[in-house]
Amino acid sequence: MDDEVISLFPLGTERSASGHLMIAGHDLAQLAKTWGTPLYVFDAGTVRNQVNKIKQLLTQYYAGPNEITYAAKSYFSLGAARHMAEMGLGVDVVSLAEMSIARKAGFDADKVHLHGNNKSEEELLAALDWGIHAVVVDSLDELLFFEKLAEKRKKKARIWLRVTPGIEVDTHPDIQTGHLTSKFGFLLSDGQAAEGIRRAQASPWFDLVGLHAHLGSQLFEAEPYLDTIEMLLSLADRSHFLPIEICPGGGWGVRYTLEDSTESPELWVKTVGKTVSEQFARRGWPLPKLVLEPGRYIAAQAGVSIYTVGTTKVVSDGTTVVAVDGGMADNIRPAIYGSKYSLLLVNRPASGTQRRTSIVGKFCESGDILISNAQLPEMHRDDVVAMPASGAYQLAMSSNYNMAPRPTVLWLTPGNVEMLQKRETLDAGGWWMGA
Ligand code: LLP
């Protein structure tokens, strides 16, 4: 079992001769001892590998200009942002804080996009003042609001419009975004998107350069991307608008368990690259800049969450319940999406018979279950365990439930450990202290 599950971890993860799990040459049991648990680690090599894979696929399947824009919402911190900027990525930000961190980390303004369905005046003005590449306008209401701000600042804004194609994708309903009732984007079917283009083009305060759509997350099918691009292009055509940039979003999935799809991102990039090429060539339009916006694909596999086992018990149906020292405060995904995860022992290889086991957190809520009813080896107090594919949307959605401190986060390269996030403490100055 170890051998197979190891493939879900960062590239090159292995067991040492003494049976410890190793990432980039670092002994996870030792890291747990030094830094305490819960502990999150990112393998730099895996992040770089994922980025390079998409870069190489874009070069292979798309002849026009392209850009990979990292979805900061999947995981962001100053250190991580610096590494992402150094890798030549652009960044999709959705808040003033993400924008400020991107700026501090050294991202070029020209590689930043601001998303969101309800951007504040402060956020829109910050985007204008920094001169980011594009604000992705989400609705007619926002278009008019932003136009007033641009006029007030006497600054023309470069924008994209986010279009909602009305396509349902095969993923958890809460992480679909391109369906008819989505809160995101200009709906295509009722003419909102066409009206948005018309008004944006008519405004002296906007330079409309592109169209955007994002269908959802953790996707393994390419057809919805193909349909979306066709719909965006036929909308542009009907609106007499020649986009010089096009972005079919992010969304490509990763493996959390051995049951998950093994479909590679080649299918995604190939489909998108070919469809954009064909659709533009058919109209005799020059190839646009193709922007892909992956978050999970870049961050998930590189990240690992590490916990220490505390209490174990057997409940009335015979399930063994193993409690770890983290849970829903650092990983809310199983509780809200029913997401499935895998686990390996860090301090020794699995041995003995497997039994039906649930891995639960330490928080005061029955739904605080990280893994439900899986066949797992026997575990005891002080065993250290690791869960793969923890890099995206865990720390990013973490909370202080039960006043839990957010964990330490490390960035591992061979021979070096960099702290990306310091474990929160109850020192003076925390938000819980009031003024
Ligand atoms: N672009 C836009 C406009 C997005 O809204 C998102 C994600 C992405 C790109 C990146 O999608 P990705 O490549 O990471 O799938 N909390 C959920 C995921 C929410 C995704 C939100 N938007 C989860 O834990 O599964």
Image (cartoon, rainbow, N blue to C red):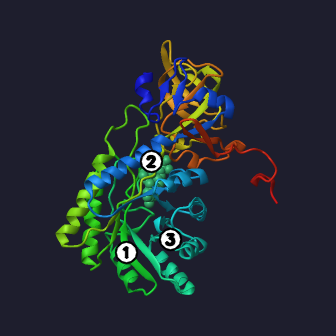
Number of other residues with Cα within 10 Å of mark 2, as a class: few under 14, some 14 to 19, many 20 or more: many
Mark 1 element type? strand
Q: Residue furthest left?
A: 282
Mark 2 element type? helix
Mark 3 element type? loop
Give the quarter of the figure containing the C terminus: bottom right
Q: Does residue 34 appear left or right of residue 268 in this picture?
A: right
Give the CA separation, mark 1 to mark 2: 26 Å
Q: Does residue 57 appear left or right of residue 417 in this picture?
A: left
Residue 178 vertical position relative to residue 262 in the rendered view, above or below: below
Q: Considering only order in the chain, which callout, 2 or 1, is on the residue closer to the N terminus?
A: 1
**Residue marked by disc 1:** 209
What type is the residue that disc 2 sits on? Ile
The x and y percentages for residue 21 are 53, 26
**Residue marked by disc 3:** 132
Number of other residues with Cα within 10 Å of mark 3, as a class: few under 14, some 14 to 19, many 20 or more: many
Q: Is mark 2 within 8 Å of ligand 1?
A: yes
What type is the residue that disc 3 sits on? Ile
The x and y percentages for residue 386 are 55, 30
Q: Considering only order in the chain, which callout, 3 or 1, is on the residue closer to the N terminus?
A: 3
* Residue 206 placement: quadrant: bottom left
**Residue marked by disc 2:** 298
* Residue found at x 59% / y 31%: 360
What type is the residue that disc 1 sits on? Val
* Residue 311 placement: quadrant: top right
* Residue found at x 23% / y 68%: 280
The x and y percentages for residue 192 are 36, 74
